[in-house]
Image (cartoon, helix red, strand yellow):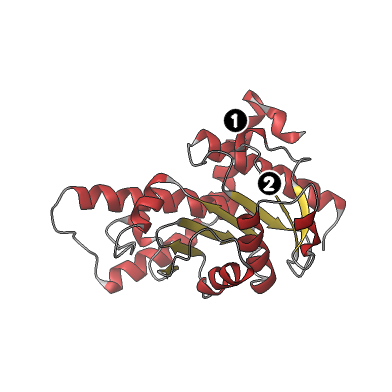
Amino acid sequence: MNTPENERQLRVDLAAAFRILHRLDMHESVANHLSAAVSDDGRQFIMNRRWIHFSNVTASNLQFLDADDESVLRGDSAPDISAWHIHSSIHRLCPGARVILHAHPAYATALSTLKDPSILPIDNNTSRFYERVAYDQSFGGIANSEEEGARIAESLQGKSVLMMGNHGATVIGETVAEAFEELYYLEKACKTMILAYSSGQPLNILSEELAYQTAKGWDDFRGASVAHFEQLKAELDATDPSYLN
């Protein structure tokens, strides 16, 4: 159930995610967007306003939006058009996607440009995503239409990660901490893939059985996402608590 207290905490956590991603250099100009559902059906959500740098996002300046109310696109506070179509479509069509992080981090984006952008199980981090990634190979340019947003939403296919060919990545989670951890490890996995490919040597791909076993093993560490995120928030609190405003 959404309450003022729950929404406040969600705003704080989402604002923290923006600031942390900025510190990790996983932002891009005043683009890329993170959102979180505030209603039980997921159709009402908060998201960063148009053209605000990640380092300037605060709990209070996150914009409240309704996926069913496109009139916001005609007002002075209209959100970024591509962000609207991607996030409103996913929140509307995938109610289980409580938190949506869409970004263009360097290694995930680089891998997305390959003919085969698969994240192969070659170590612990890459195996984390074994059979948990959807791949969208039908890039349609900037997502400035409802049809493109719906196509992207449908591409998730019940997965927690969408590798968007020639574009970047989108991850979803039940909480900000879980979604952040997913994006954090996704970028590490993609970095491993790019570095391994750059060696020019054949990849030593794990067997299906071992890859599955390793992926399942990550379930025992779900609590780590909260611990990691809370400690990164504590660092923010100590160095720049302005995100709380």
SS label for mark 1: helix
Between label 2 and label 1, give the one nearer the viewer. 2
Residue at image coords 75%, 57%:
73
Residue at image coords 49%, 52%:
183
Instruction: Determine which of the numbered discs, if any, sits on residue 81 in the image.
Output: none
Q: Which residue is mark 2?
A: 48
Answer with the quarter of the image where residue 135 lies: bottom left
Instruction: Find the residue positioned furthest to the front.
Output: 74
Q: Is residue 141 above or below residue 110?
A: below
State how far apart marks 2 and 1 are (Cα): 22 Å
Q: Please provide percent x and percent y for residue 177.
A: 60, 50
Of 135 and 133, which appears nearest the observer? Answer: 135
Q: Residues within 10 Å of mark 1 (few under 14, many from 20)?
A: few
Tag 1: amino acid: Glu
Q: Which residue is mark 1?
A: 235
Q: Please provide percent x and percent y for residue 6.
A: 80, 52
Tag 2: amino acid: Asn
Of 222 and 53, which appears nearest the observer? Answer: 53
Instruction: Find the residue positioned furthest to the right.
Output: 4
Residues at circles 2 and 1 in contact by the CB criterion of under 8 Å: no
Residue at image coords 14%, 51%:
200
Is residue 203 found left or right of 141 in the rendered image? left
Q: Please provide percent x and percent y for residue 11.
A: 74, 46
Q: Please provide percent x and percent y for residue 17.
A: 61, 43
Quarter of the figure that contains the N terminus: bottom right
SS label for mark 2: loop
Q: Residues within 10 Å of mark 2 (few under 14, many from 20)?
A: many
Is residue 80 found left or right of 135 in the rendered image? right
Is residue 125 found left or right of 2 in the rendered image? left
Q: Is residue 143 above or below residue 147?
A: above
